[in-house]
Amino acid sequence: MQGNFVYSNPTKLYFGENAITGLENELGRYGKNVLLCYGGGSIKKNGVYNDVISALRNAGKMVFEDSGVMPNPTIDKVLQGAALAREHEIDLILAVGGGSVIDYAKAVSASAYCKEDPWIKFYVNAEMPSTNLIPIGCVLTMAGTGSEMNGTSVISNNAVGKKYGCAFGEILMPKFSILNPEYTLSLPKYQMIAGIFDIMSHIMEQYFSGNDDNVSDYIAEGLMRSVINSGRAAAKNPLDYEARSNIMWAATWALNSLLGKGKTGDWEVHAIGHAITAATDSTHGMTLASFSIPYYRYIMDAGLHKFKRFAINVWSVAPRDMDDTAIAKAGLDAMEEWMREIGAVMNPRELGVTDEMIDGIAESAFKRPGAYKVMTNESIAEILRTAMGEI
Ligand code: NZQ
Ligand code: ZN
């Protein structure tokens, strides 16, 4: 059954090898002062910076650079960026990078003219901005988060050891995003695989809820099949353009507000993943991968119908004489095999999680209303211990 919803997604996309030509067109719509946000310097090595700067010059923009946006961007950095944006009366924030840079740009936009503490207002209390927002544009260099076409921003606060997302929605979706798969080819393989698993996880978080007949679930199954095939091909040959372009497009659709419509969703894997990052500052997609198999085995019985459907429609498990439990298990076994094949992290220890950290991570993970099973500190700790080979 489809729930009730409003659907609107205003982000304009330019996709493909010549996508950057769209940037100049778009820049013409905004005022002169542009805040160019980017990360630790990968865009200077792979030529993306030069492409962007030449478009900005051609469009006659005054460019203020805000570099050094770190993976898992911090609220401290956001406050610095917000001060810069105010000081230079920025008309457009151009985020050039992966999810971290785009999430950061959204946070800067919301915080620039905010009179309250942005961490408390947006990330703890999930309140919406009440002051002017600065429009955001994006040039994507890493496929995974879907931030290029959604209104979510995830920020870390190291002082309190928390990482929280704020779903700003339509008001902070990028006005446009430039998606050139070639820009992702310079990604280290570890980051590429992290991105691939992040995409898969976004789809699963939305798929594993409800046992009704919902349009989203059919779209999700197709997207997952595409990510599985392209993920395999990209893991074998990271320079395979066909695979990388499919991954980039699938990433955008996995989390651009379409799949979640009319459904409740789970999102507990992300809640636990964020708690792992808050404790270890590790790579987002790998935090999710490190315990997903034990998590899904833990909740499988409570959502058996859906796990059976997942096995058959996504992993092509042939039901033969198996009962529902055996079919569902075979699906998760196939997923585990795929994750090992592409090189996903399969144990939180590899990310620096220690036995002593387990209870703290379990306690700090946000407990969502849940799809099939509501998590408690104890159940999260048990899942992590299983993932870490303790049980
Ligand atoms: O900083 P630079 O030098 O650019 O290096 C980055 C960074 O070290 C590098 N990189 C990116 N593109 C590259 C490249 N290196 C070489 N060539 C390229 N083309 O990759 C590293 C990771 O980048 P990052 O932006 O951190 O990765 P990702 O896109 O996975 O973003 C992760 C952040 O997004 C949040 C995560 O929690 C995390 O903070 N998420 C945002 C979501 C959203 N807005 O909807 C949803 C997600 O579930 C996620 O929570
Ligand atoms: Zn994610």
Image (spheres, rainbow, N blue to C red):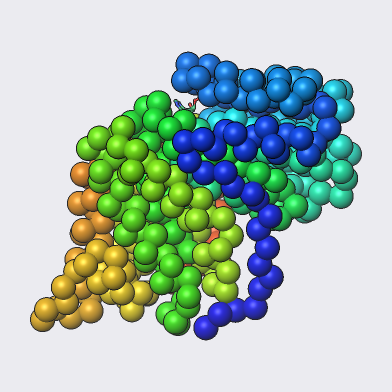
Q: Nearer the viewer, residue 306 or 287?
A: 306
Residue 282 in picture, x, y percent from top left: 45, 33
Q: Answer left or right for 54 relative to 324.
A: right
Above or below for 26 versus 203: above
Q: Please tell me which residue is depicted at 58% across the width and 69% down the height of the picture.
A: 261
Q: Answer left or right for 363 relative to 285.
A: right
Above or below for 83 versus 100: above
Q: Please tell me which residue is depicted at 37% across the width and 66% down the height of the picture.
A: 221
Q: Answer left or right for 327 relative to 256.
A: left
Q: Please tell me which residue is depicted at 78% across the width and 53% down the height of the picture.
A: 128
Residue 321 in picture, x, y percent from top left: 10, 81
For the question of whether residue 162 can be seen, the reply is no
Residue 45 in picture, x, y percent from top left: 47, 16
Q: Answer left or right for 119 relative to 368.
A: right
Q: Nearer the viewer, residue 175 or 19?
A: 19
Q: Nearer the viewer, residue 64 or 110?
A: 64
Residue 65 in picture, x, y percent from top left: 70, 19
Above or below for 186 versus 171: above
Q: Please tell me which residue is depicted at 25% across the width and 72% down the height of the picture.
A: 312
